[in-house]
Image (tube, grey):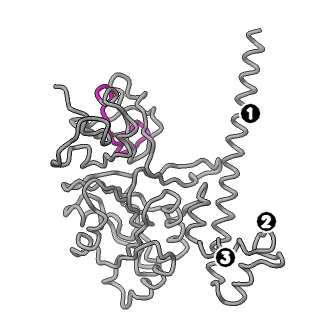
């Protein structure tokens, strides 16, 4: 049976569409941003599907009357939209991403690891206990800013804390662009307090270390035991891994919810803009330094060091900014150098092949 794909194209590209119930694709995050990248002809030949999981053996995709696993091939991550090649799925086209989370992959080769794409809101989860860490929250928020995703800090386990207000105050001081929500994940509060972000056609991602309550929040939003949960260690309040892979699921109302494994260590890479946005006051101060290449450490006329000495900038925050910026610069440069080396090696191989043919 042929389908009418004109409703998936941007306005003006086809006949006008009357207001109606959301289509299957729209319920799963299909937006004008993606429809503008395709045509009626391609839609008829290659239907859109969304990646819900990625494993070594391939990717699980979901579309209108489509639910299948495709072999490894497309360079896709969870949340991506593909134009599915039904004859040769490995040739499926990955649509341009509206947003993308990435970090430096574990190991020594300094590669990038894609975490998720096409996310509208990042729920950055932390507990009101000794596992609370401002520096870690700053890293997640910088990633969100770099990905052009709205960050929301969720503070859990408030019911187990004598006074959660200090945690709220510290979280609010991180960035005036990040909303802070305090809640009890085991109550009905997640549904009511997170409703503004969990809307039809939107995608939210839960980020945070293990044991902070991400899976509990996922279950609360679904109203059932969708994700596995486990307690925390009593000695240091650190959690046990219950989510072992990224999995995008959809509520009956059409909100995509992505649960991610706990990431205690997040190495920054290619996130210069996100860090600059997070530390906007320090970025502005740097423009007032005497030297354009000021390292903000020992140079005379450094506006940032002067602000630290005067008490206008917190010393600990300045140190965290320096660490993040240096880490990002090192990892990004290493990645660029590796690409350059690979390109140079490729030229050597091509020259050798041409010489052999001669």
Whether residue 216 is visible here, answered yes or no, is: no
Residue 300, placed above or below residue 215: below
Give the numbered dot on residue 293. 2
Span shown in magenta: 44-59
Query: Total marks drawn?
Result: 3
Which quadrant of the view contains residue 149? Answer: bottom left
Which quadrant is home to the C terminus?
A: top right
Mark 3 element type: helix
Crowd rating for badge 1 (residues with CA inside 10 Å; few <14, some 14–19, many 20+) = few
Q: Would residue 265 appear left or right of 243 to someone viewing this image?
A: right
Most common secondary structure along the magenta stretch: strand
Residue where numbered disc 1 is placed: 344
Q: Which of marks 3 and 1 is nearer the N terminus?
A: 3
Secondary structure under badge 2? Answer: loop
Q: In this view, does 266 lie to the left or right of 223?
A: right
Q: In which quarter of the image is the N terminus?
A: top left
**Which residue carries the number 3 mark?**
319
């Amino acid at each position: 049976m042929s389908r009418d794909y004109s409703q998936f194209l941007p306005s003006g590209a086809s006949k006008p569409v009357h207001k109606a119930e959301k289509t299957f694709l729209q319920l799963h995050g299909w937006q004008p941003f993606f429809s503008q990248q395709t045509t009626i002809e391609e839609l008829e030949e290659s239907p859109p599907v969304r990646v819900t999981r990625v494993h070594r053996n391939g990717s699980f995709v979901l579309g209108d009357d489509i639910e299948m696993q495709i072999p490894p091939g497309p360079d896709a991550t969870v949340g991506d939209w593909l134009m599915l090649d039904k004859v040769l799925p490995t040739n499926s086209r990955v649509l341009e991403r509206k947003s993308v989370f990435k970090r430096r992959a574990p190991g020594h080769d300094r590669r990038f690891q894609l975490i998720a794409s096409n996310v509208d809101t990042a729920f950055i989860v932390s507990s009101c206990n000794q596992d609370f860490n401002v520096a870690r929250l700053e890293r997640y928020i910088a990633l969100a800013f770099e990905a052009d995703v709205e960050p929301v800090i969720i503070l859990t386990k408030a019911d187990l804390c004598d006074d959660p207000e200090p945690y709220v105050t510290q979280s609010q001081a991180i960035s005036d662009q990040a909303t802070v929500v305090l809640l009890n994940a085991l109550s009905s509060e997640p549904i009511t307090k997170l409703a503004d972000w969990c809307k039809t056609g939107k995608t939210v991602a839960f980020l945070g270390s293990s044991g902070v309550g991400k899976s509990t929040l996922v279950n609360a939003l679904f109203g059932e035991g969708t994700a596995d949960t486990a307690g925390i260690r009593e000695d240091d309040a650190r959690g046990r891994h219950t989510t072992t892979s990224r999995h995008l699921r959809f509520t009956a109302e059409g909100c995509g919810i992505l649960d991610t494994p706990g990431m205690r260590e997040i190495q920054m890479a290619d996130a210069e803009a996100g860090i600059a946005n997070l530390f906007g006051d320090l970025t502005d101060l740097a423009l007032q330094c005497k030297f354009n290449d000021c390292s903000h450490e020992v140079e005379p006329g450094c506006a940032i060091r002067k602000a630290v000495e005067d008490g206008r900038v917190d010393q600990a925050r300045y140190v965290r900014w320096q660490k993040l910026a240096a880490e990002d610069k090192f990892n990004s440069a290493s990645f660029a150098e590796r690409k350059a080396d690979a390109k140079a090696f490729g030229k050597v191989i091509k020259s050798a092949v041409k010489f052999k043919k001669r």
